[in-house]
């Protein structure tokens, strides 16, 4: 009886850990950094670790419809912005976006100048109209 209980607890623990890991990762194995809505679209910023860091970052920007399918929005851009503080001038780190084999998914490369709280500014224009969103993100 004691052995069965231990096995059941072990299986339950493994299942909980697995479910928690799966909830954080999207279908491509990328981990969500931040996600927000823009009209009927959801815009998600992700990468392998689920975190931004000071320095070079390889990201994915994904635009999905209400059913969760990636949709081609046409032209897209990402700017990582930090407002001026005291004597420090505002900073804008523009990402280089390239398309992928999946319409609606863009690879973004950006060099973030310093750790801290930034605004990820995403713009798009195309078949789904034009839009702009800002998301607060933390770089370590």
Image (tube, rainbow, N blue to C red):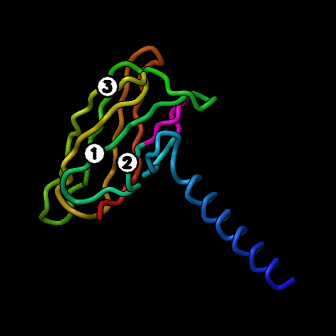
Q: Residues within 10 Å of mark 3 (few under 14, many from 20)?
A: some
Residue 41 drawn in magenta:
yes
On screen, residue 125 above or below 64: above
Q: Quadrant of residue 73?
A: top left
Q: Nearer the viewer, residue 47 or 35?
A: 47
The x and y percentages for residue 61 are 38, 37
- At 67% from the left edge and 71% from the top edge, which residue is drawn? 13
Query: Is label 3 in a helix, a strand or a loop?
Result: strand
How packed is label 2: few (under 14 Cα within 10 Å), some, or many (20 or more)?
many
* Outermost right residue: 1
Mark 1–mark 3 distance (CA, rounded to whole Å): 13 Å
List the residue tagged with mark 3.
Answer: 99
In this view, the residue in front, 80 or 27, is 27
128 left or right of 99? right
Q: Is residue 81 above or below residue 87?
A: above
Asked which quadrant contains residue 10, the reply is bottom right
Give the percent coordinates (x, y) of residue 80: 27, 46
**Which sits earlier in the primary sequence, circle 3 or circle 2?**
2
x and y percentages locating residue 100 in the rendered image? 34, 26
Mark pair 1, 2: CA separation: 7 Å
Looking at the image, which residue sits at the far top? Answer: 127
The one of 120 and 61 positioned closer to us in this rendering: 61
Mark 1 touches mark 2? (CB < 8 Å): yes
Please tell me which residue is depicted at 82% across the width and 77% down the height of the picture. 4
Residue of label 1: 58
Q: Which residue is mark 2?
A: 47
Q: Mark 1 or mark 3: which comes first in sequence?
A: 1
Spatial CA distance of label 3 from label 2 is 15 Å
Q: Residue at x 42, y 38 (%)?
A: 133
Residue numbers of the magenta segment: 37-44
Quick one: label 1 or label 2, which is nearer the N terminus?
A: 2
Please state the horizontal and vertical placement of residue 78, each as a whole percent of the image: 30, 37
């Amino acid at each position: 009886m004691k052995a069965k209980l231990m096995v059941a607890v072990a299986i339950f623990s493994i299942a909980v850990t697995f479910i928690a890991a799966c909830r954080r990762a999207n279908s491509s194995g990328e981990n969500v950094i931040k996600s927000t809505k823009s009209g009927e679209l959801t815009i998600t910023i992700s990468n392998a670790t689920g975190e931004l860091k000071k320095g070079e970052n390889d990201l994915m920007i994904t635009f999905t419809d209400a059913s969760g399918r990636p949709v081609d929005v046409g032209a897209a851009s990402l700017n990582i912005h930090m407002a001026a503080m005291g004597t420090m001038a505002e900073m804008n780190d523009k990402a280089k976006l390239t398309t992928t084999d999946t319409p609606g998914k863009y690879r973004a490369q950006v060099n973030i100048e310093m750790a801290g709280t930034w605004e990820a500014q995403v713009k798009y224009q195309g078949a789904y109209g034009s839009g702009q969103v800002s998301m607060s993100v933390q770089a370590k």
